[in-house]
């Protein structure tokens, strides 16, 4: 076994450095002679005349001392041309032993650590088969200054050449250095497009995130994956996953140029985002999750992940596949996601929410975790992004089975009520469903202002185009009617009176479930308002008398009810249009003598004569004739002649556009 050359005494090379080349040879000899070598190394104790190797060793030591001095003088962190004069150091076998001197000197001055890392890299490039000589030196440096070592190594060898990979393997396989080095590497991976960390020598040069990805890819290719990769798998998984997102959305010029160099060096016929996917696949495979990789491939999930518009859908698919193979692992990933979303400025909330929505129910939330989740999801409910709102609602619905969570969700009530004004039917449907769970699963009553605001927000939803929204909003409305305290009943009466007409119309809804729920809710409202007459008609299912009773009881609201009923003449459902025509006809009889309202009714009914449904069109014309007959007695004989002439004109196709409004206008003139 080859013996390690003896270390040069510190006093010798320090004084050489201080005195310079003009020092007397006798002075140098005087400082070297007192050195007592160990007994086992006595065989190598010879004078310069006895063994020329001793002179070679001494010359190398002097060169290293000058090299240290040059490191101190350099202000930059690059291995520039000024160090080429010391290239013999990289070739000599004794330089490995002298690296210990560099480490010792470096600890007294941390600013020299980056230069030492570059020295080690250059030495490894020049000595291909002597990697083991540098392990202790490199690990000592990394243990003392991990940030300097990691950042310098990424800067000096961004494409992770042979020497750099040797250094990374040494660092990652040592219990002393693996964790601090990996944490710094994760910090770099979590940035885009570059990460800037000032090292001890003042270097602030940014390190491209893709360079860190190349390092991880190289590490994952070695036969034995470092243990810390397993420990920090959730962190690596998250950062690689969202680096795919960043590199898909944005590709800066410096990243593109760097990647072209990597492609030439390694023959990677792929883009940075595809390379990030490739690294993510390698990570999953090395962690024995090949089933996830295969399942994603079979469902085209990896290709979907590479499109910015569909990226979050693919993340959700990946989360589902991960939950099938390891729930504890998904729990760890979820916790890390929550920590990132709550502590950092979020730049990838959409894909993060997509993952959370799939696996959040698997997470056993502690008291602190529950508050963190609600804080994150509450922020997303107010987002301008529709998909973020949708995913936040979906995540909340996943947590609704947890009693402690539903109680905490009371704080979200105000935000949820505001969401009822959203234009997306799916978002409204989930919001109403969530509000229903919150209200029904708690003994607490909603504060009066919030209850009134919710009732007011629900009324327009009765006529929503999405039947699920109609059904859920009517059900929640009925729940609110049955829950209020005595002091709230008076304030609710105004809103409940406004609900009578919409509920009446939806009793004729083509969706049988909506019709049944509307009738049940109409009965609850009638009971709440203490309208015995309306209550009896609903129970007896005599809805055709309901409108007459409603209009006769409150003539002052007839005009308002009429204008609201006219909106149903344009409803897509034939049954609702038919009910609206009958209501307007009934309202017209109670509006005799009120020319403006009657003209409005007749104009609307005349337009309905051309309805797509023949039955509805005929009913509209018949109702129009009845109203005109009622009004006929209020005009002179000339008015009646005009009305007869109008009816005659309606039998002529080319005069069908003339209507009662024109006749009445002529009579008035």
Image: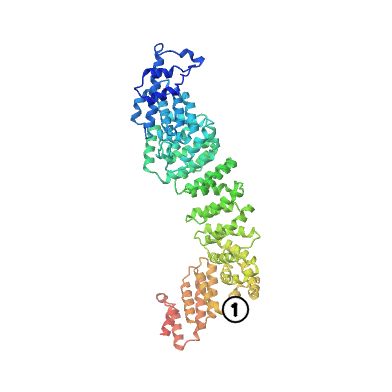
Q: In which quarter of the image is residue 287?
A: top right
Residue drawn at x 49%, y 33% is: 144
For the point 49% across and 60% down, the residue is 423
Relative to residue 490, is residue 242 depicted above or below?
above
> How far across and down, in percent of the image, does residue 129 sit?
44, 22
Q: Where is residue 414 in the image (x, y as percent from the top left)?
A: 55, 60
Which residue, as the protein is rendered here, is positioned at the far top? 50
Residue 434 in the image: above or below residue 40: below
Q: Which of 154 and 216 is in front in this view?
A: 154
Instruction: Give SS at disc 1.
Output: helix
Instruction: Residue 483 in the image: state x and y as whole percent.
Output: 64, 65
The quarter holding residue 449 reads bottom right
**In the rendered view, would you say 477 is above or below 76?**
below
**Quadrant position of the C terminus in the picture:** bottom left
> Closer to the camera, 177 or 455?
177
Please state the total of marks drawn on the protein image: 1
Name the side, left or right, on which 535 lies relative to 598: right
Res. 74 image quadrant = top left
List the residue tagged with mark 1. 553
Is residue 300 visible to the viewer in this orientation of the structure?
no
Left or right of 561? Residue 248 is: left
């Amino acid at each position: 076994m080859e013996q390690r050359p003896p270390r040069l005494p510190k006093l010798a090379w320090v004084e050489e450095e201080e005195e310079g080349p003009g020092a007397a040879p006798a002075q140098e000899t005087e400082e070297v002679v007192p050195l007592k070598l160990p007994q086992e190394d006595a065989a190598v104790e010879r004078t310069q005349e006895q063994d020329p190797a001793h002179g070679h060793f001494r010359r190398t030591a002097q060169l290293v001392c000058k090299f240290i001095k040059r490191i101190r003088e350099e202000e930059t962190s690059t291995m520039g041309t000024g160090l080429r004069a010391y290239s013999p150091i990289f070739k000599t076998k004794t330089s490995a032993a002298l690296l210990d001197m560099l480490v010792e000197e470096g600890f007294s001055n941390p600013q020299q650590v980056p230069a030492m890392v570059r020295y080690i890299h250059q030495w490894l490039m020049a000595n291909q088969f002597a990697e083991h000589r540098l392990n202790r030196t490199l690990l000592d440096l990394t243990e003392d200054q991990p940030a300097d070592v990691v950042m310098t190594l990424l800067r000096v060898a961004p494409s992770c050449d042979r020497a750099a990979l040797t250094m990374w393997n040494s660092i990652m396989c040592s219990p002393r250095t693996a964790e601090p080095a990996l944490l710094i590497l994760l910090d770099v991976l979590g940035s885009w497009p570059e990460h800037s960390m000032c090292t001890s020598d003042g270097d602030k040069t940014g390190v491209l995130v893709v360079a860190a990805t190349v390092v991880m890819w190289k590490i994952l290719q070695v036969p034995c994956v470092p243990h810390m990769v397993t420990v920090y798998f959730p962190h690596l998984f998250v950062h690689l996953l969202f680096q795919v997102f960043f590199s898909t959305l944005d590709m800066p010029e410096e990243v593109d140029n760097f990647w072209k160099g990597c492609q030439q060096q390694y023959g990677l016929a792929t883009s940075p985002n595809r390379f990030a996917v490739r690294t993510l696949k390698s990570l999953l495979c090395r962690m024995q999750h090949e089933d996830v990789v295969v399942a994603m491939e079979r469902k085209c999930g990896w290709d979907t992940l590479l499109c910015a518009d569909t990226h979050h859908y693919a993340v959700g698919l990946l989360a589902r596949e991960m939950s099938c193979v390891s729930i504890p692992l998904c729990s760890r990933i979820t916790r890390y996601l929550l920590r990132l979303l709550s502590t950092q400025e979020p730049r990838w909330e959409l894909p993060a929410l997509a993952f959370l929505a799939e696996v959040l129910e698997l997470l056993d939330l502690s008291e602190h975790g529950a508050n963190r989740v609600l804080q994150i999801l509450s922020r997303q409910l107010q987002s301008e992004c529709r998909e973020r709102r949708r995913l936040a609602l979906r995540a909340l619905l996943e947590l609704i089975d947890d009693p402690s969570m539903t109680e905490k969700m009371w704080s979200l009530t105000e935000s949820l009520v505001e969401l009822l004004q959203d234009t997306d039917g799916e978002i409204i449907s989930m919001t109403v469903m969530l509000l229903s769970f919150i209200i029904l699963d708690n003994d607490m009553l909603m504060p009066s202002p919030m209850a009134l605001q919710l009732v007011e927000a629900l009324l327009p939803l009765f006529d929503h185009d999405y039947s699920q929204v109609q059904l859920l909003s009517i059900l929640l409305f009925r729940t609110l009617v049955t829950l209020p305290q005595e002091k709230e009943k008076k304030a609710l009466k105004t809103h409940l009176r406004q609900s009578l007409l919409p509920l009446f119309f939806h009793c004729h809804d083509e969706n049988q479930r909506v019709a049944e729920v509307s009738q049940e809710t109409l009965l609850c409202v009638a009971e709440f308002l203490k309208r015995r007459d309306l209550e009896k008609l609903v129970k007896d299912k005599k809805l055709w008398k309901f409108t007459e009773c409603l209009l006769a009881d409150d003539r002052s609201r007839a005009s308002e009810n009429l204008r609201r009923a006219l909106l149903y003449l344009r409803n897509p459902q034939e049954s609702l249009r038919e009910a609206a025509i009958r209501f307007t006809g009934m309202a017209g009889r109670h509006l005799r003598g009120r020319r403006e309202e009657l003209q409005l009714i007749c104009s609307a009914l005349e337009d309905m004569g051309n309805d797509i449904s023949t039955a509805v069109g005929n009913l509209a014309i018949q109702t129009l004739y009845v109203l005109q007959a009622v009004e006929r007695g209020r005009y002179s004989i000339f008015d009646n002649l005009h009305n007869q002439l109008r009816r005659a004109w309606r039998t002529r196709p080319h005069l069908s556009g003339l209507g009662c409004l024109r006749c009445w206008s002529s009579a008035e003139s």
